[in-house]
Image (cartoon, grey):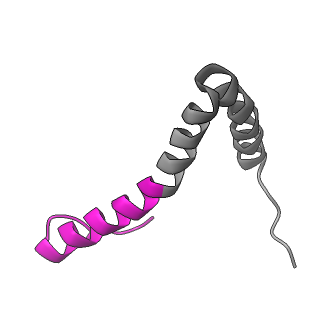
Amino acid sequence: MARRKSHRSQLYRVARDLGKPRAARDGGVKGLAKRDARRIAYPKTNTVIGSLLGALGWFGNRRKR
């Protein structure tokens, strides 16, 4: 059974979809490529930094709610 999407996630998806043409218009193809590169790179670097800090004991021991 597919999960029901919340209204908030649908609004964020629409905003993201509307932002892509705006980024292409304002920044051109180069600006859109930068945006996509950041979208791909940030989660990876955040994971690496978080795991490194967790190994040092500075981060990662918080309880999730």
Mark yes or no: residue 62 visible: no
Residue 65 visible at all = yes
Q: Is residue 7 left or right of residue 27?
A: right
Q: Nearer the viewer, residue 28 or 36?
A: 28
Any magenta on residue 57?
yes
Residue at x 26% of width, y 63% of height: 49
Q: Nearer the viewer, residue 29 or 64?
A: 29
- Report the residue that reaches farthest toward the right: 1
| Count of numbered circles in the view | 0
Relative to 38, say whether 2 is above or below: below
* Residue 65 x/y as whole percent: 45, 64
* Residue at 17% from the left image edge and 77% from the top image edge: 55
- Which residue appears farthest toward the top when viewing the image? 26
Left or right: 9, with 58 as reference point: right
User: With respect to residue 25, does 5 lie above or below?
Assistant: below
Q: Is residue 23 left or right of residue 35?
A: right
Residue 62 in magenta stretch: yes
Q: What residue span does the magenta drawing correspond to?
A: 41-65
Front position in the image: 12 or 22: 22
> Where is the N terminus found, in terms of image quarters?
bottom right
Whole-percent x and y of residue 12?
69, 41
The residue nearer to you, when weighing 29 against 61, is: 29
Which x, y percent locates residue 13? 73, 45
Q: Give coordinates of residue 19: x percent, y percent.
A: 68, 32
Q: Main secondary structure of the magenta part?
A: helix
Task: Report which quarter residue 44 is drawn in.
Answer: bottom left
Q: Is residue 10 above or below residue 44?
A: above
Residue at the image position 51 percent from the left and 49 percent from the top: 37
